[in-house]
Image (spheres, grey):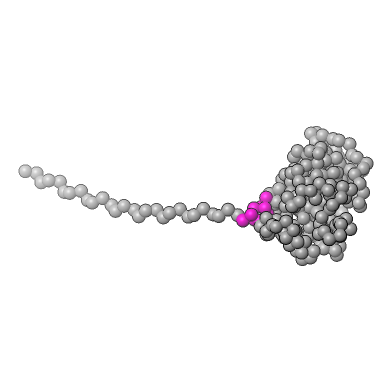
Amino acid sequence: PPLPPPPLPPPPPRPPPAPPPPPPSPPPAVGEAIRDAINSRFGRKPYRDKWSAQGTLPNAGVLIHVFDNYESRANEPGNPFIYYQSDNKQMSASLIFADQRPDCCPELPIPVYSTRGFSGTQGIIFRPGHFTKILCGSASDRSGQQCKSWCPSITIDGDESRFDPRNTGHGFDGCGGAWRPKDFGVYLQRMSRVEGEGGLAAWNHRLEYNEILIAGAHWTRHLPEAIEAFFGDGEPVRSQHQRFLSEFGLRDVDVPLLRFDPRNWKEPFGG
């Protein structure tokens, strides 16, 4: 009779079980998340965001105030000098954003107010939303002027073809006056175009900063939420930051003190 077939070979050994997946990365600390949100906002163009006639600060660009020694003159005795108390006081600020960087001159730093010896580039970052109320803006330093000599309201649609950045007629924005809050988008875009396409940055070897006036009493009523972070190094920002945290019972991670590098156009604020 035929021989039986040989037995089948044993099955191969089972592979060892796969190692367990690595644990998920921990979420960033609160201070780091704030820093990342600010840098992300710096990268967004503010031209077509909703600029409210009521002055609500939109979530594009970073609105900063650089300490300039005017704070101490505006306060009542005994208050931290970053506070504003009365209805007739205003705080100067400037909106910075990545699209201010002109193609002609990428080496130029982010345009900010320079205090020339008082504190360097240090100050506070305003939180977007209803915490901050914008009164007006302009394409240059108004030297303490009030909101007056209003620029006309212009729609941003079609303005690129209407406005010639090489022949503005007046000022860096074709107006030279004050912007109403609802008109910020078109005038910020005009200013960026004048710096780049119009050749102003190459001619001046620097970028102009915009100036924005903030309602002081509204800002004070919305503390501490109105301040998202402090920035800079040295004094007075370190002592002001600590005094602010103590005043409102906050921690560093709640309202961080960030480094600011005006030559870093991708992530200017560091932890």
Residue at left offset 81%, top offset 46%: 218
- Measuring from the top left, give residue 254's x and y in whole percent: 67, 55
Q: State the image quarter where residue 244 is shown.
A: bottom right
Residue at left offset 82%, top offset 55%: 83
- Measuring from the top left, give residue 224's x and y in whole percent: 74, 52
Q: State the image quarter where residue 45 is shown.
A: top right
Determine if the magenta segment contains residue 65: no
Does residue 96 appear in this view?
no
In depth, the one of 60 and 109 nearer the eye is 60
Left or right of 72 on screen, residue 58: left
Task: Provide the residue span drawn in magenta.
Answer: 29-37
Q: Name, please, the residue furthest toward the front.
A: 78
For the C terminus, the quadrant is bottom right
For the N terminus, the quadrant is top left
In depth, the one of 3 and 208 nearer the eye is 208
154 up-or-down from 228: above or below = above
Tally of numbered tags: 0
Does residue 55 appear in this view?
yes
Magenta stretch, overall SS: helix
Left or right of 70 on screen, residue 157: left
Determine if the magenta segment contains residue 33: yes
Q: Name, please, the residue furthest toward the left.
A: 1
- Measuring from the top left, give residue 164's x and y in whole percent: 86, 40
Residue at left offset 80%, top offset 64%: 236
Residue at left offset 82%, top offset 44%: 134
In depth, the one of 49 and 69 nearer the eye is 69
